[in-house]
Image: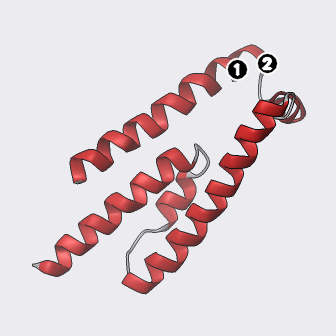
Protein backbone atom coordinates (compact mmCIF):
# COMPACT_ATOMS: atom_id res chain seq x y z
CA UNK A 1 0.00 0.00 0.00
CA UNK A 2 2.91 2.36 0.55
CA UNK A 3 3.57 2.59 -3.18
CA UNK A 4 -0.12 3.30 -3.85
CA UNK A 5 -0.15 6.07 -1.23
CA UNK A 6 3.06 7.58 -2.62
CA UNK A 7 1.61 7.60 -6.14
CA UNK A 8 -1.58 9.19 -4.81
CA UNK A 9 0.50 11.84 -2.98
CA UNK A 10 2.32 12.68 -6.20
CA UNK A 11 -0.94 12.90 -8.16
CA UNK A 12 -2.63 14.76 -5.30
CA UNK A 13 0.08 17.41 -5.41
CA UNK A 14 0.78 17.56 -9.15
CA UNK A 15 -2.78 17.72 -10.50
CA UNK A 16 -4.11 20.59 -8.34
CA UNK A 17 -0.85 22.55 -8.61
CA UNK A 18 -0.85 22.10 -12.40
CA UNK A 19 -4.11 24.08 -12.41
CA UNK A 20 -3.29 26.56 -9.66
CA UNK A 21 0.22 27.67 -10.63
CA UNK A 22 -0.72 28.85 -14.16
CA UNK A 23 -3.64 30.76 -12.64
CA UNK A 24 -1.29 32.44 -10.16
CA UNK A 25 1.18 33.28 -12.93
CA UNK A 26 -1.65 34.92 -14.89
CA UNK A 27 -3.51 36.74 -12.11
CA UNK A 28 -1.08 36.85 -9.21
CA UNK A 29 -2.14 35.88 -5.73
CA UNK A 30 -5.39 37.86 -5.90
CA UNK A 31 -7.51 36.20 -3.19
CA UNK A 32 -10.79 38.05 -3.96
CA UNK A 33 -10.44 37.10 -7.64
CA UNK A 34 -9.60 33.52 -6.68
CA UNK A 35 -12.79 33.28 -4.61
CA UNK A 36 -14.78 34.92 -7.40
CA UNK A 37 -13.48 32.36 -9.92
CA UNK A 38 -13.96 29.48 -7.47
CA UNK A 39 -17.65 30.21 -6.93
CA UNK A 40 -18.35 31.95 -10.24
CA UNK A 41 -20.56 29.19 -11.63
CA UNK A 42 -22.81 26.68 -9.91
CA UNK A 43 -20.56 23.77 -10.92
CA UNK A 44 -17.41 25.45 -9.61
CA UNK A 45 -19.20 26.35 -6.36
CA UNK A 46 -20.30 22.71 -6.11
CA UNK A 47 -16.73 21.49 -6.59
CA UNK A 48 -15.22 23.94 -4.11
CA UNK A 49 -17.84 23.27 -1.46
CA UNK A 50 -17.09 19.55 -1.85
CA UNK A 51 -13.35 20.22 -1.47
CA UNK A 52 -13.98 22.38 1.60
CA UNK A 53 -16.07 19.72 3.35
CA UNK A 54 -13.54 17.01 2.40
CA UNK A 55 -10.72 19.17 3.75
CA UNK A 56 -12.48 19.62 7.07
CA UNK A 57 -13.19 15.89 7.26
CA UNK A 58 -9.54 15.07 6.51
CA UNK A 59 -8.35 17.54 9.17
CA UNK A 60 -10.62 16.01 11.80
CA UNK A 61 -9.59 12.49 10.77
CA UNK A 62 -5.88 13.34 10.93
CA UNK A 63 -6.14 14.93 14.37
CA UNK A 64 -8.37 12.26 15.94
CA UNK A 65 -6.77 9.20 14.35
CA UNK A 66 -3.28 10.61 14.79
CA UNK A 67 -3.83 11.11 18.52
CA UNK A 68 -5.59 7.76 18.94
CA UNK A 69 -2.72 5.85 17.32
CA UNK A 70 0.10 8.06 18.54
CA UNK A 71 1.28 8.96 15.05
CA UNK A 72 4.03 11.55 15.03
CA UNK A 73 4.25 14.56 12.72
CA UNK A 74 0.54 14.82 11.96
CA UNK A 75 1.16 18.49 11.30
CA UNK A 76 2.55 17.49 7.89
CA UNK A 77 -0.74 16.30 6.35
CA UNK A 78 -2.50 19.25 8.00
CA UNK A 79 -0.02 21.53 6.25
CA UNK A 80 -0.60 19.59 3.00
CA UNK A 81 -4.23 20.73 3.14
CA UNK A 82 -2.82 23.95 1.69
CA UNK A 83 -2.53 22.02 -1.56
CA UNK A 84 -5.71 20.08 -0.91
CA UNK A 85 -7.29 16.98 0.57
CA UNK A 86 -6.04 15.06 -2.47
CA UNK A 87 -2.52 15.35 -1.05
CA UNK A 88 -3.29 15.47 2.67
CA UNK A 89 -5.32 12.26 2.89
CA UNK A 90 -2.92 9.90 1.08
CA UNK A 91 -0.03 11.48 2.98
CA UNK A 92 -1.69 10.74 6.30
CA UNK A 93 -2.62 7.23 5.17
CA UNK A 94 1.04 6.70 4.26
CA UNK A 95 2.07 7.91 7.72
CA UNK A 96 -0.49 5.60 9.32
CA UNK A 97 0.75 2.64 7.25
CA UNK A 98 4.36 3.34 8.24
CA UNK A 99 3.30 3.69 11.90
CA UNK A 100 1.44 0.36 11.82
CA UNK A 101 4.41 -1.37 10.20
CA UNK A 102 6.75 0.04 12.85
CA UNK A 103 4.47 -1.22 15.65
CA UNK A 104 4.24 -4.69 14.09
CA UNK A 105 8.00 -5.17 14.26
Q: How is the image coloured?
A: secondary structure
Q: How many marks?
A: 2
User: Residue 65, position in %: x, y?
Assistant: 46, 77
**Which residue is most to the top?**
26
Which residue is label 1 attached to? Answer: 23
Q: Secondary structure at mark 1?
A: helix
Does dot 2 land on a helix, a strand or a loop? helix
Q: Is the residue under label 1 in contact with that under label 2 (CB below 8 Å)?
A: yes
Left or right of residue 17, residue 100 in this image: left
9 over 32 or under it: above or below: below
Q: Give the residue at mark 2.
A: 27
96 over 25 or under it: above or below: below
Quarter of the C terminus within the rendering: bottom left
Give the position of the N terminus as an image quadrant.
bottom left
Q: Residues within 10 Å of mark 2 (few under 14, many from 20)?
A: few
Q: Is residue 64 left or right of residue 102?
A: right
Residue 10 falls in which quadrant of the image? top left
Say which quarter of the image contains residue 96: bottom left
Q: Residue at x 66, y 47 (%)?
A: 51
Please tell me which residue is depicted at 46% across the width and 30% down the height of the picture: 14
Q: CA distance from mark 2 to mark 1?
A: 6 Å
Residue 102, position as x, y percentages in the image: 18, 74
Using the image, determine if residue 46 lies above or below residue 55.
above
Near mark 1 (Cα within 10 A), the count class, few <14, some 14-19 or many ≥20, is some
- Disc assigned to residue 70: none
Question: Residue 22: horizontal and vertical position, in percent?
Answer: 64, 17
Residue 66 position, x and y percent, is 44, 76
Q: Nearer the viewer, residue 49 or 100?
A: 49
**Quadrant of the image occupied by residue 78:** bottom right
The residue drawn where x is 41% and y is 35% is 11
Amino acid sequence: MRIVYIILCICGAALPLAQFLPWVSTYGLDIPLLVQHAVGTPISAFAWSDVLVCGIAVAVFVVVEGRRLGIRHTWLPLLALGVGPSLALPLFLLQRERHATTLAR
